[in-house]
Image (cartoon, rainbow, N blue to C red):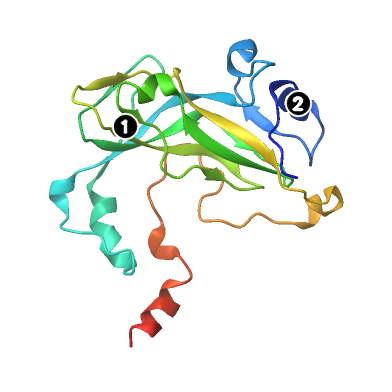
Amino acid sequence: MTSVLGGIEIKQRMREAFPSKLVITPILNGDQQIPDHAAAVDLRLGPQFIVAKRSHFAQIDARDADSLTPVYQSQEHFDVGMEGEIVIHPQQFLLAATLEYLRIPMDLTGSVIGRSSWGRIGLIIATATAVHPGFTGCLTLELQNLGDTPIVLHPGTRIAQIAFYRVGADPASFTSRVYRAKYVAAIGPEFSRLGNDADWKMINQLKR
């Protein structure tokens, strides 16, 4: 049966040796970010952001990877530093990344959720919440302000949570399983690579 890890067990997994070690770094305040009684780890907002200007492209057709090129070209990348800030306006969408770098062992999977304190002022933290076994890197967060008032975001603030679940992997298989994905070892926010999905060729054939 799949079960969620509690705070004490999360800390234990962070002290284990590879390959079963769970890496979450840096932890600025362990008692605050990983309370013993909780079943999740608080994640902090990193200093890097990506904003795409809507006026620079008409539409996105994920079936055609070339249609994403104008989006890439219209992106603005910001690194405001840990002492800086960024404002997300009503109905604005931007990409951010966690301050923490993660490595998830092959017998665990993660689920990212927003902190309710942010949700109650209209800020949605993540729309793609699953973090697969073997993931390494900073997590990209999809931020959207659904409220009516601009929100100031400060790097270092606790903005999301990640819960960990067991997936029943055989520990003996850890070293033989290789994580393959589109987003690996990122140290900042990454834009969509939807055009790289392998099934577009099959879908295009069905349309003929």
Looking at this view, name the residue that lies furthest to the right. 172
In terms of sequence position, does the residue under pointer 1 or pointer 2 come before the other? Answer: 2
Where residue 194 sits in the image (x, y, percent)? 40, 59
Quadrant containing the N terminus is: top right
Pointer 2 residue: 9
Residue at point 71% right, 34% down? Answer: 22
Q: Is residue 16 left or right of residue 131?
A: right
Label 1 CA crowd tier, 10 Å (few <14, some 14–19, many 20+): few
Q: Amino acid at mark 2?
A: Glu
Pointer 1 residue: 78
Q: Is residue 82 left or right of residue 12?
A: left
Where residue 149 sits in the image (x, y, percent)? 19, 22
Residue at point 33% right, 88% down? Answer: 208
Q: Amino acid at mark 1?
A: Phe
Label 2 CA crowd tier, 10 Å (few <14, some 14–19, many 20+): few
Is residue 81 visible from the viewing direction of this image? no
Residue at point 68% right, 34% down? Answer: 4
* Residue 128 in which image quadrant: top left
Looking at this view, name the residue that lies furthest to the front. 1
